[in-house]
Amino acid sequence: MLRSATPDDLDFVCALQARPEYHALIAEDGRDRLLGYLSGTSEQLLIWARSDTREGFVLLSGNLHDGGKVELRRLALDQPWRGQGQALLADLITYVFDTIGAYRLWFDVADDNDRARRAYERAGFIHEGTLRKHWHRRTGDKVDLALYGMLAEDRKP
Protein backbone atom coordinates (compact mmCIF):
# COMPACT_ATOMS: atom_id res chain seq x y z
CA MET A 1 0.00 0.00 0.00
CA LEU A 2 1.25 3.48 -0.83
CA ARG A 3 0.69 6.32 1.61
CA SER A 4 1.89 9.90 1.85
CA ALA A 5 5.20 10.24 3.63
CA THR A 6 5.43 12.14 6.91
CA PRO A 7 8.42 13.78 8.63
CA ASP A 8 8.81 10.56 10.63
CA ASP A 9 9.58 8.71 7.38
CA LEU A 10 12.48 10.92 6.26
CA ASP A 11 15.20 9.02 8.13
CA PHE A 12 14.06 5.84 6.36
CA VAL A 13 14.11 7.53 2.94
CA CYS A 14 17.50 9.19 3.55
CA ALA A 15 19.06 5.93 4.70
CA LEU A 16 17.63 3.98 1.78
CA GLN A 17 18.74 6.35 -0.96
CA ALA A 18 22.21 6.67 0.63
CA ARG A 19 22.94 2.93 0.39
CA PRO A 20 25.98 2.19 -1.77
CA GLU A 21 24.01 -0.25 -3.94
CA TYR A 22 21.75 2.63 -5.01
CA HIS A 23 24.54 5.10 -5.91
CA ALA A 24 24.61 4.03 -9.55
CA LEU A 25 20.82 3.68 -9.79
CA ILE A 26 19.04 6.66 -8.21
CA ALA A 27 19.69 10.29 -7.39
CA GLU A 28 19.83 11.37 -3.76
CA ASP A 29 18.07 14.34 -2.15
CA GLY A 30 18.97 15.83 1.20
CA ARG A 31 16.59 15.90 4.14
CA ASP A 32 15.53 19.52 3.52
CA ARG A 33 14.60 18.79 -0.08
CA LEU A 34 12.69 15.67 0.98
CA LEU A 35 10.86 17.72 3.60
CA GLY A 36 9.79 20.10 0.82
CA TYR A 37 8.23 17.22 -1.07
CA LEU A 38 5.86 16.64 1.85
CA SER A 39 4.14 19.97 1.34
CA GLY A 40 4.71 20.53 -2.36
CA THR A 41 2.00 20.53 -4.98
CA SER A 42 4.06 19.23 -7.89
CA GLU A 43 5.93 16.43 -6.08
CA GLN A 44 4.70 13.69 -3.81
CA LEU A 45 6.83 11.45 -1.62
CA LEU A 46 5.11 8.15 -0.87
CA ILE A 47 5.98 5.29 1.43
CA TRP A 48 5.27 1.73 0.38
CA ALA A 49 4.31 -0.31 3.44
CA ARG A 50 2.84 -3.70 4.07
CA SER A 51 1.80 -4.85 7.54
CA ASP A 52 2.82 -1.42 8.91
CA THR A 53 6.43 -2.03 7.88
CA ARG A 54 8.10 0.43 5.53
CA GLU A 55 9.41 -1.50 2.55
CA GLY A 56 10.23 1.26 0.07
CA PHE A 57 9.51 4.73 -1.21
CA VAL A 58 8.36 6.42 -4.40
CA LEU A 59 8.81 10.01 -5.53
CA LEU A 60 6.28 11.31 -8.06
CA SER A 61 6.30 14.60 -9.93
CA GLY A 62 4.03 16.37 -12.36
CA ASN A 63 0.33 17.03 -12.55
CA LEU A 64 -0.75 15.21 -9.40
CA HIS A 65 -4.20 16.67 -8.88
CA ASP A 66 -6.24 16.85 -12.05
CA GLY A 67 -5.72 13.86 -14.28
CA GLY A 68 -2.53 14.84 -16.04
CA LYS A 69 0.72 13.06 -16.67
CA VAL A 70 2.83 11.87 -13.75
CA GLU A 71 6.56 11.22 -13.67
CA LEU A 72 8.04 8.53 -11.47
CA ARG A 73 11.18 10.32 -10.31
CA ARG A 74 12.53 7.75 -7.90
CA LEU A 75 11.74 4.33 -6.51
CA ALA A 76 13.67 2.24 -4.00
CA LEU A 77 12.98 -0.92 -2.04
CA ASP A 78 14.41 -1.72 1.38
CA GLN A 79 15.07 -5.32 0.32
CA PRO A 80 15.13 -5.35 -3.49
CA TRP A 81 16.27 -8.97 -3.72
CA ARG A 82 13.05 -10.36 -2.18
CA GLY A 83 10.92 -10.18 -5.33
CA GLN A 84 8.70 -7.32 -4.16
CA GLY A 85 9.14 -5.13 -7.22
CA GLN A 86 6.02 -6.31 -9.03
CA ALA A 87 3.86 -5.76 -5.95
CA LEU A 88 5.20 -2.22 -5.55
CA LEU A 89 4.70 -1.48 -9.24
CA ALA A 90 1.14 -2.81 -9.13
CA ASP A 91 0.37 -0.55 -6.15
CA LEU A 92 2.04 2.39 -7.94
CA ILE A 93 0.02 1.85 -11.13
CA THR A 94 -3.21 1.64 -9.12
CA TYR A 95 -2.33 4.76 -7.16
CA VAL A 96 -1.40 6.85 -10.20
CA PHE A 97 -4.35 5.88 -12.38
CA ASP A 98 -7.10 5.27 -9.81
CA THR A 99 -6.24 7.63 -6.95
CA ILE A 100 -4.62 10.51 -8.84
CA GLY A 101 -6.60 9.92 -12.02
CA ALA A 102 -3.61 10.45 -14.31
CA TYR A 103 -3.77 9.49 -17.96
CA ARG A 104 -0.02 8.81 -18.27
CA LEU A 105 2.79 7.53 -16.01
CA TRP A 106 6.33 7.85 -17.31
CA PHE A 107 9.92 7.65 -16.09
CA ASP A 108 13.51 7.08 -17.11
CA VAL A 109 15.84 4.36 -15.93
CA ALA A 110 19.56 3.81 -16.48
CA ASP A 111 19.81 1.82 -19.70
CA ASP A 112 22.21 -0.66 -18.10
CA ASN A 113 19.85 -1.43 -15.18
CA ASP A 114 18.60 -4.65 -16.76
CA ARG A 115 16.90 -5.94 -13.61
CA ALA A 116 14.73 -2.82 -13.28
CA ARG A 117 13.97 -2.72 -17.00
CA ARG A 118 12.74 -6.32 -16.95
CA ALA A 119 10.55 -5.55 -13.92
CA TYR A 120 9.03 -2.48 -15.61
CA GLU A 121 8.33 -4.39 -18.82
CA ARG A 122 6.71 -7.27 -16.88
CA ALA A 123 4.47 -4.69 -15.21
CA GLY A 124 3.30 -3.47 -18.63
CA PHE A 125 5.44 -0.36 -19.21
CA ILE A 126 6.50 0.32 -22.78
CA HIS A 127 10.04 1.33 -23.76
CA GLU A 128 9.53 4.61 -25.61
CA GLY A 129 13.08 5.62 -26.45
CA THR A 130 16.59 6.29 -25.20
CA LEU A 131 18.41 9.47 -24.23
CA ARG A 132 22.09 8.93 -24.96
CA LYS A 133 24.64 9.76 -22.22
CA HIS A 134 21.97 11.83 -20.51
CA TRP A 135 22.47 11.12 -16.80
CA HIS A 136 25.55 11.84 -14.70
CA ARG A 137 25.54 9.24 -11.94
CA ARG A 138 26.74 9.98 -8.44
CA THR A 139 29.55 7.59 -9.31
CA GLY A 140 30.72 10.06 -11.98
CA ASP A 141 29.96 8.19 -15.20
CA LYS A 142 27.54 9.26 -17.91
CA VAL A 143 24.91 6.74 -18.94
CA ASP A 144 22.05 6.39 -21.37
CA LEU A 145 18.53 6.64 -20.00
CA ALA A 146 15.74 4.43 -21.26
CA LEU A 147 12.34 6.14 -21.30
CA TYR A 148 9.30 4.11 -20.27
CA GLY A 149 5.64 4.98 -20.17
CA MET A 150 2.17 3.67 -19.59
CA LEU A 151 -1.16 5.18 -20.55
CA ALA A 152 -4.23 4.47 -18.47
CA GLU A 153 -5.60 2.36 -21.31
CA ASP A 154 -2.36 0.31 -21.44
CA ARG A 155 -2.92 -1.18 -17.99
CA LYS A 156 -2.95 -4.93 -17.69
CA PRO A 157 -6.27 -6.32 -16.45
Image (cartoon, rainbow, N blue to C red):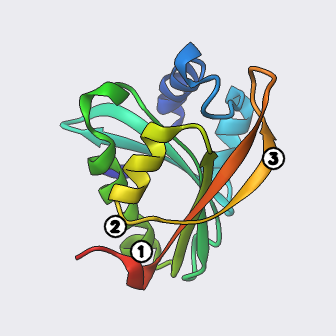
- Number of callouts: 3
The amino acid marked with disc number 2 is Thr
* Side of 99 where 86 appears, left or right: left
Q: Nearer the viewer, residue 114 or 21?
A: 114
The amino acid marked with disc number 3 is His
| Residue at figure coordinates x 57%, y 82% from the top left | 66
Mark 1: which secondary structure? helix
| Residue at figure coordinates x 62%, y 34% from the top left | 26
* Side of 131 where 92 appears, left or right: left
Of the numbered discs 3 and 2, the one sitting upstream in the chain is 2
Q: Which residue is under mark 3? A: 134
* Side of 42 where 140 appears, left or right: right
- Relative to 99, is 27 above or below? above
* 3D distance between C-alphas at marks 1 and 2: 5 Å
Q: Nearer the viewer, residue 131 or 78?
A: 131
Residue 44 spot, x, y in % from top left:
58, 54
Mark 3: which secondary structure? strand
- Relative to 37, is 30 above or below? above
| Residue at figure coordinates x 48%, y 31% from the top left | 9
Q: Which residue is under mark 2? A: 94
| Residue at figure coordinates x 34%, y 32% from the top left | 54
